[in-house]
Structures are given as C-alpha cells and as structure tokens.
C-alpha cells in the first residue's frame, strides 16, 4: 500500500521474519500479533519490486501499480530518485545491507552483516554529476565535507561517496538504470601525527 | 459509513486523563484493532485532521489497521503517513500534540451541520494563518536561510496532566515537517 513517500506492507509472521532477517523495512508496532506491518522506504520498495520482483504496490482500491507507475511516483517525490535507487541497488548487489542514514545526516548507512549483529561500517552519500535538481547539493563546499567527515568519525563510520554519472537516456524510463555508471570512493581524514610510522596513507581509495 | 461529527464524538473510547493512560501503555502496542476501538490518539489525530467526518464506522465495527492506513494514504485534510509517524512518535513519548492552527475544542462554536463545520474550519485556518505570519518570525528566519517549504504542522506541549483543551496556552514547541 502506497502512503506518501513510503510503502506499507502487511505481512504474515513468516514473511515478517524474512523481511527482518534480510533487513528490509522497519516493523511498525501494532497490537495485532498475527500480522506485522512494515514500512518500506522508496528505494527498498522499488528494489523488492523491480530487482527482486517479489512485491506489488497498490495505490488505492486494490489496483496494482506497474513498475513504471511506481518509478514515476517516486520520481515525483524526489527528482534524484533514479540516482539514489541506483546507488542502493549497487550496494545491495554487493551484499551490503543498506538502511537509511538520515540519523547521521547522510543518505544511507551500509552494514556488512545484519544490523542486529554489527554496526554499520560506511556512511554513504550519493552524489551525481548532474546539476540542478538531480544533484543533492552535498559536498559542494569544503565546509560540508569537513562537517560530514567529523560526524562520520564520531560515529565510527567511514564516509563512502557513491557517484552516479548521468546517462544519456531519458531519466523517465527505467532504461537509464542500465546506463548509469557508479563509482564509489571512501574519504577519510588524514591525521599527519598518526602517520609518521608509515602505517599507511589512508586517503581516497577506490572501493572494490 | 461516515456521518456528520459532533466535536467530541471522535474521541469515543477515551477516558479522562488520556495522557496518563498512554504513558502507562508506553510499551504496549499503540494501535488497537478488532474489538477495541482505535486508540485515542489515532482518533484524536484523525479527528483534528478530518474535521467534520466521523472517524469510526457507525456500526460499532472499528476500522481495521489496514483501513486506517488506507485513509491516511488518501491524504485528505492534510493527512499523511509522515505526519502520522511524527504524531505517533511524540504521543508515545507523552507529549501533547495538536494540529497547528486548529483550535483544541469546538465547544465554544456553533455546530449546525457538516458543511458549515467545514466552512468554519476553513475560516479559522485563514485567520490563524494571518496571525501566524505575525507571530512566528522563525519561519521567516528559516526562509532566509533558504530552507523553504517550512510550514508548522504540530503544536507540541510538554507532558502535563493539567492540560486543558479550552485554554492550552502557548505550545512548548512547534513542529515543522520537512521532506
């Protein structure tokens, strides 16, 4: 069920268990013990729908939306949704567990394993080389980079910048997903005092 | 299914001191279904959101959670999942939350029928918007910082057992929702 930006899913216990284990969505506390409600973010919902093909979303009156309709809906809420989804898809396909990073002022956080077992390693920011509405406006100035790095440091995460390069084809169609080029880089602070022993320079390194 | 509301009717199932009750039930599931009526807060929220429409089905069958969610998804009267989430979160923590700009009680106003109620609600909104523009310079501050599209959504009061709907006083916080 589509509700605003998110998707609500009513799940039997077994499905709820599966969703929790695969770390999709957030369980909503209700009094009903037989069924659980999950709240899925746009990227999660679209991933389940488009990539895993295991979810259908209805807007109202029980009619299911097609993938295109869902794509258009999420794009209408956020212009840069294609890039954000591409980044989500990229990380998920490399077996990272990707959750929202809003609590840390970033776009996503990435866990190596299930969030119940570990803390997230990476704080992910998605930038695109587009201008205007498709770029999130992050990391355009040094002060933002400093702030973000400091926050990441305090919560023991490494900043991962996922750059999604624009594609030629129309962003309205799903084909653009194939054409996006994704690069991921980590950025860390270099602290000269700690590097004198030559343990290694930890600057921008390509990931994978 | 829906019938014209009288002002307090939406809060069927509440007891006096509902705020205390919620705090006791902090760990309990928030939304109820089946035999029990939808929780007071849900009702209250939807009451404030949907002014003029009855919240529950008339035949004593409560709306299921699914139906409630569907209604929120419809987005009428400024309802949205996001604002519901914010409301739910604060209510669970014990705050007193009301829609910004809407009066807490209709007791002092004449209620004739559905249409008039809606109209008077709209009038109130118009008036309070003007007042709001004068009273809340912070909105202007935020605009100057180019954080646009900020409009107050909820008035939030600290948990307070002596809270009176007829004279709520100034809110402790004003909550704005940003997408």
Image (spheres, coloured by chain):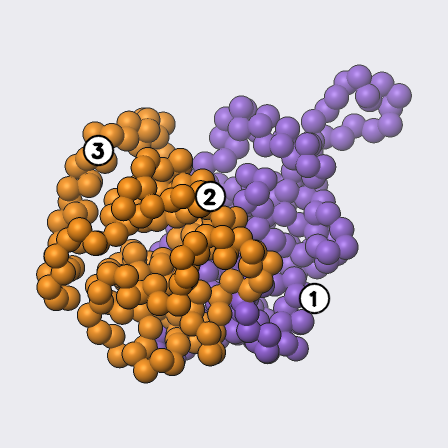
Task: Name the element at disc 2.
Answer: loop
Q: Colour of chain B?
A: orange
- Residue A163, by quadrant, is top right
Q: Nearer the viewer, residue A168 or B26?
A: B26
Check if mark 3's residue and mark 1's residue have beta carbons within 8 Å.
no
Residue of label 1: A21
Mark-to-mark CA distance, 2 and 3: 27 Å
State the image coordinates of residue A60 (x, y, percent, origin top left): 35, 74
Task: Name the element at disc 3.
Answer: helix
Viewport quadrant of the N terminus of chain A: bottom left
- Classify 10 Å Cα crowding around label 2: few (below 14), some (14-19), many (20 and above): some
* Residue B29 visible (yes or no): yes
Residue of label 2: B159
State the image coordinates of residue A43 (x, y, percent, origin top left): 52, 59
**On what subunit does the disc labeled 3 rest?**
B
Q: How many numbered discs, if any?
A: 3
Mark 3 vs mark 1, foreground winner is 3
Residue of label 3: B133
């Amino acid at each position: 069920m589509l509700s605003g930006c998110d998707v609500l899913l009513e799940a039997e216990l077994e499905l709820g268990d599966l969703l929790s284990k695969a770390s999709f969505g957030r369980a909503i506390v209700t009094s009903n013990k037989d069924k659980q409600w999950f709240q899925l973010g746009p990227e999660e919902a679209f991933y389940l729908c488009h990539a895993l093909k295991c979810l259908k979303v209805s807007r109202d009156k029980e009619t299911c939306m097609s993938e295109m309709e869902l794509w258009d809906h999420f794009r209408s809420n956020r212009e840069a949704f294609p890039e954000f989804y591409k980044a989500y898809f990229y990380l998920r396909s490399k077996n990272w567990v990707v959750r929202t990073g809003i609590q840390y002022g970033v776009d996503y956080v990435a866990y190596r394993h299930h969030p119940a077992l570990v803390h997230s390693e990476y704080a992910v920011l998605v930038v695109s080389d587009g201008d205007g509405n498709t770029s999130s406006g992050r990391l355009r100035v040094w002060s933002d980079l400093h702030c973000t790095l400091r926050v990441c440091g305090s919560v023991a995460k490494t900043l991962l910048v996922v750059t999604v390069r624009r594609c030629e084809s129309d962003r309205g169609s799903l084909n653009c997903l194939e054409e996006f080029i994704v690069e991921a880089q980590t950025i860390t602070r270099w602290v000269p005092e700690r590097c004198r022993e030559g343990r290694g320079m930890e600057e921008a390194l390509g990931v994978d | 299914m829906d019938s014209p509301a009288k002002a307090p009717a939406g809060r069927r199932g509440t007891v006096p001191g509902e705020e205390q009750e919620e705090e006791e039930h902090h760990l309990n599931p928030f939304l109820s279904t089946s035999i029990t009526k939808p929780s007071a807060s849900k009702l209250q929220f939807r009451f404030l959101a949907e002014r003029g429409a009855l919240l529950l089905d008339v035949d004593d069958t409560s709306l299921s959670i699914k139906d409630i969610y569907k209604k929120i998804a419809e987005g009428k009267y400024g309802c949205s999942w996001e604002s519901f989430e914010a409301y739910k979160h604060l209510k669970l923590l014990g705050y007193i939350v009301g829609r910004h700009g809407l009066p807490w009680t209709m007791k002092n106003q004449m209620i004739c029928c559905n249409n008039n109620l809606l109209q008077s609600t709209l009038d109130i909104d118009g008036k309070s918007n003007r007042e709001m523009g004068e009273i809340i310079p912070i909105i202007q501050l935020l605009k100057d910082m180019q954080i646009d599209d900020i409009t107050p959504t909820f008035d939030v009061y600290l948990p307070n057992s002596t809270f009176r709907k007829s004279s709520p006083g100034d809110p402790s916080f004003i909550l704005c929702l940003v997408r």
